[in-house]
Image (spheres, grey):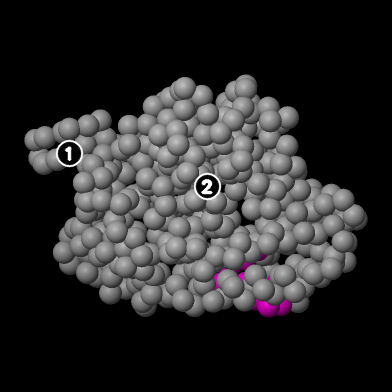
């Protein structure tokens, strides 16, 4: 029997029969975008589900990051992590900010608060950390530094849908938190994103900025962009939200099975869970360390040769790409922990439809190397 390929992630897709009534309602009311009824319903539903006061939907997470920067009028330098998807730094560049890279913590691979203060200059105006793999940053330490230096904090929370830390939703920390609803995420709307903010006035500004800066038909108050979520995307999000308990339960079971199956393999280190109240098990990264028979790329290729398509999230570092490597903060000597992680990390397949048989095949290939 031919075995099917297994990818690092696949989107959860409700049945077409479930989606049909939503499509019929959109066709009947003839509202396709511009903050229609499904858009409004999804914003309200997400506020309730996530435990946050305000959600502004976007067509994708990158535009949400750029708009978050614009809404807070961020200028100058922004401290961020090199260990992330490149959109984190790209959003800063698009907005005219200069990213300053700060090394990460060796356990969580999140921005290391102990290294933040040394990176602050008179030009620094904000910090943009990432809740890497959905594990919360040290939000209290980061906020204390931000308060001391009068800096804004915008969290790239692309991985952190539904995650709770010691005091509730991790999305309530910082000035703003930005989510991605891309098809590869735990919760998706095909393409999409959102900004979580604390007060209605800030949401009003964000909503205007994502719609060209319009206030009404004849009034434009800012050079906004077109970043609105369509009604079809919003409707899909509403449907997917109904399935979140089973999605998270299945991802948790897969996470636990990996930890059991990979335990005791010399040179294979699973990142620890961070002890948060609620994890979304967004990714399952391992670090391939000395003592394992293959290096990371060798294991990557072994899995690929057997139809297992893992991903090296995050390799290369953002700071290694040509548009950033000339920055003083991008030197690998400044980022030893992030550089070591990037050379060793491998994210294994984790998604609700991953079968126990396919997962055991992944584990067997790693054990048998």
Q: Which badge, 2 or 1, comes first in the chain's sequence?
A: 2
Of 117 and 22, nearer the camera is 117
Q: Which x, y percent locates residue 259?
A: 72, 70
**On residue 214, which mark appears?**
1
Whether 315 is drawn above or below 279: the answer is: above
Q: CA distance from mark 2 to mark 1?
A: 38 Å
Q: Residues within 10 Å of mark 1 (few under 14, many from 20)?
A: some
Task: Name which quarter of the figure residue 47 lies in.
Answer: bottom left
Quickly name the residue at label 2. Answer: 141
Q: Residue at x 25, y 45 (%)?
A: 202
Q: Which x, y percent locates residue 306?
A: 78, 62
Of 323 and 171, nearer the camera is 171
- SS at mark 2? helix
Q: Residue at x 40, y 34 (%)?
A: 150
Give the side of residue 236 with respect to residue 87, left or right: left
Q: Give the position of the N terminus as an image quadrant.
A: bottom right
Residue 46 seen in the figure: no
């Amino acid at each position: 029997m031919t075995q099917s390929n297994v990818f690092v992630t696949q989107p959860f897709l409700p049945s077409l029969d479930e989606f049909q009534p939503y499509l019929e309602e959109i066709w009947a009311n003839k509202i396709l975008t511009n903050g229609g009824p499904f858009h409004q319903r999804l914003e309200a539903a997400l506020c309730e589900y996530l435990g946050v006061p305000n959600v502004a939907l976007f067509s994708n997470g990158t535009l949400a990051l750029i708009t978050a920067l614009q809404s807070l009028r961020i200028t100058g330098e922004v401290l961020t992590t090199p260990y992330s998807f490149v959109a984190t730094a790209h959003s800063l560049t698009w907005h005219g900010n200069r990213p300053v890279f700060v090394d990460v913590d060796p356990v969580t691979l999140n921005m290391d608060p102990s290294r933040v203060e040394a990176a602050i200059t008179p030009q620094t105006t904000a910090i943009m950390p990432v809740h890497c793999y959905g594990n919360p940053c040290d939000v209290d330490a980061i906020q204390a530094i931000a308060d001391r230096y009068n800096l804004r904090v915008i969290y790239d929370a692309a991985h952190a849908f539904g995650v709770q830390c010691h005091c509730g939703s991790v999305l309530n920390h910082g000035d703003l938190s930005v989510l991605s609803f891309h098809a590869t995420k735990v919760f998706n709307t095909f393409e999409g994103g959102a900004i979580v903010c604390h007060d209605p006035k800030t949401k009003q500004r964000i909503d205007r900025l994502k719609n060209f800066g319009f206030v009404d038909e004849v009034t434009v108050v800012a050079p906004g962009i077109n970043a609105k979520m369509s009604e079809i995307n919003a409707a899909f999000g509403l449907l997917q939200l109904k399935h979140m308990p089973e999605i998270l339960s299945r991802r948790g079971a897969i996470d636990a099975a990996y930890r059991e199956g990979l335990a005791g393999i010399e040179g294979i280190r699973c990142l620890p869970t961070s002890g948060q109240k609620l994890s979304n098990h967004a990714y399952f990264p391992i670090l391939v360390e000395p003592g394992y028979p293959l290096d990371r790329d060798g294991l990557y290729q072994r899995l690929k040769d057997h139809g297992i398509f893992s991903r090296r999230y995050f390799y290369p570092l953002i700071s290694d790409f040509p548009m950033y490597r000339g920055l003083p903060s991008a030197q690998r000597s400044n980022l030893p922990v992030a550089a070591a992680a990037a050379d060793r990390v491998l994210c294994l397949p984790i998604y609700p439809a991953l079968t126990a048989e396919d997962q055991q095949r992944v584990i067997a290939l790693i054990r048998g190397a």
